[in-house]
Image (cartoon, rainbow, N blue to C red):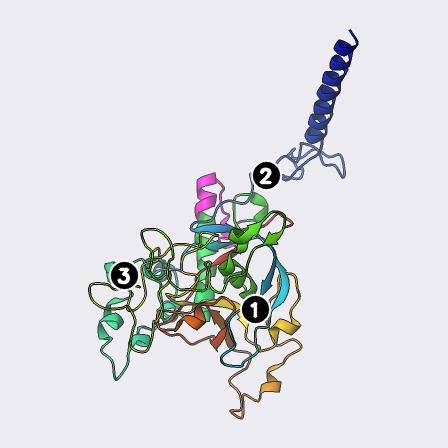
Amino acid sequence: MNKIVRLFQSVSFVVCGIAILTSCSKSRPTAENPGGVSTATGLEYNSDGGFQVNDFEGQPAGPNLVYIEGGRSILGSFEEDILNSRDNIERTVTVASFYMDETEVSNIHWTEYLYYVKLDSSREFYQSALPDTTVWTSELAFNDPYREHYLRYPGFRFYPVVGVSWIQANDYCEWRTNMVNLKLAEDAGVEVPAESGGRIALESGVVIPNYRLPTEAEWEYAAQALIGTQWLDENQTHQRIYPWDGHALRNPYGKTMGSFLANFKRGRGDYAGIAGKLNDGAMITAYAYEYPPNDFGLFHMAGNVNEWVQDLYRPLSFQDVDDLNPIRRNGYLDGEDYYDFENYNSLINDKVRVFKGGSWKDVAYWMSPGTRRFLEEDSSTATIGFRCAMISAGSNY
């Protein structure tokens, strides 16, 4: 009899506990379920003339974006500093969760952009949006077919766009934000007032934050993808020289054993191997999904094309930036006057931006996520492209 009573008491305790937890979860408002009445004023939401609280089901998914869970990481170069630049010393930082394009922005995306820009922008802006196809030109090489065909020929549709400056990449991010949000608003039946100039209120709950270039820290963190090296609780078994495991550039496993894991320059004059066994398969850029993705699901975070990031270049950024979501957006604490650009004693000023990742024309050293270089923000080459990123709004991690 006592056993039955004790069993009854245990069951009652569990049921009561569940009931309490359920009642608490129902009574506490959340972003998705704010309730019908303000917890601050007691006024009713969405009444006539009252404060409007729109439905919200979380941040909408942006096309081509992959979720990157943030966390603590050691950024910096794990390769030998062969240039003795000392510009990316290892340091521990925390990067908040964000989203990033799974592939580099491709030619088909850029020609789509040009199509819409031509419809509703000035001739001057359309001209400014055109990639510089002369980046393929060399007096001592026959690259003329790429100059004429690479951007627009259908066979190159899903190859990364090149000849795009840092400034042009930022313009594209702004346009893409507007177009995606207009489509999301249309799908949700939200009208965009003409007087708003096409801007959709964030409070609507149907739009996404801005597309933008990733910060250098975000890019490097995403390239490392150390979620695949964890063991037990917050222990990582190893760091990575490249966005994959191991010290080698070839796949050590399975049917593709011996195949290269990225598109890069294998050696002087060797871009792809020999006929019959073109190992890395690309003498210039490669198809956007050509090689296996890293553990975050991102393609070509090493090789193919270098990628622009937001940051202004400074050799000592690693010393100055914050350790939470670091970025160098200007010359704060490290002005361009220190570098004597005007007298040609340095290439560093407030117009040079970081690019990372290595390219089809780079040796393997530059494919390590910690390496970094810079170029003027209005310049472009046949070896630099970009991908977009976006914050993860409404979360604290």
Task: Quote the CA–CA distance across marks 2 and 1.
Answer: 43 Å
- The local secondary structure at tag 3 comes to helix
Closer to the camera, 388 or 198?
388
Badge 1 local density, few (<14 within 10 Å), some, or many (20+)?
many
Could you tell me if the residues under marks 1 and 3 are in contact, i.e. CB atoms within 8 Å?
A: no
189 drawn magenta:
yes
Residue 360 placement, left or right of 178:
left
**On the image, numbered disc 1 is attached to which residue?**
76
Dot 2: element: loop
Residue segment shown in magenta? 183-200
265 relative position to 184: left or right: left
Q: Amino acid at mark 2?
A: Asn
**Residue 114 appears in view:** no
Taking the view exactly as shown, the residue that stands out farthest to the right is 2
- Looking at the rendering, which quadrant does residue 41 occupy? top right
Report if residue 82 is visible in the image. Answer: yes
- Give the image location of residue 387, x and y in percent: 44, 61
Q: Residues within 10 Å of mark 2 (few under 14, many from 20)?
A: few
Pick the front one: 377 or 245? 245
Which residue is drawn at the image coordinates 47% and 52% (left, top)?
295
Describe residue 191's horizontal placement relative to residue 362 as left or right.
Answer: right
Picture coordinates of residue 366 (x, y %)?
44, 71
**Identity of the amino acid at label 1?**
Gly
Residue 330, numbered label: none
* Residue 47 x, y percent position in the rendering: 65, 33
Q: Which residue is mark 2?
A: 54
Residue for badge 3: 156
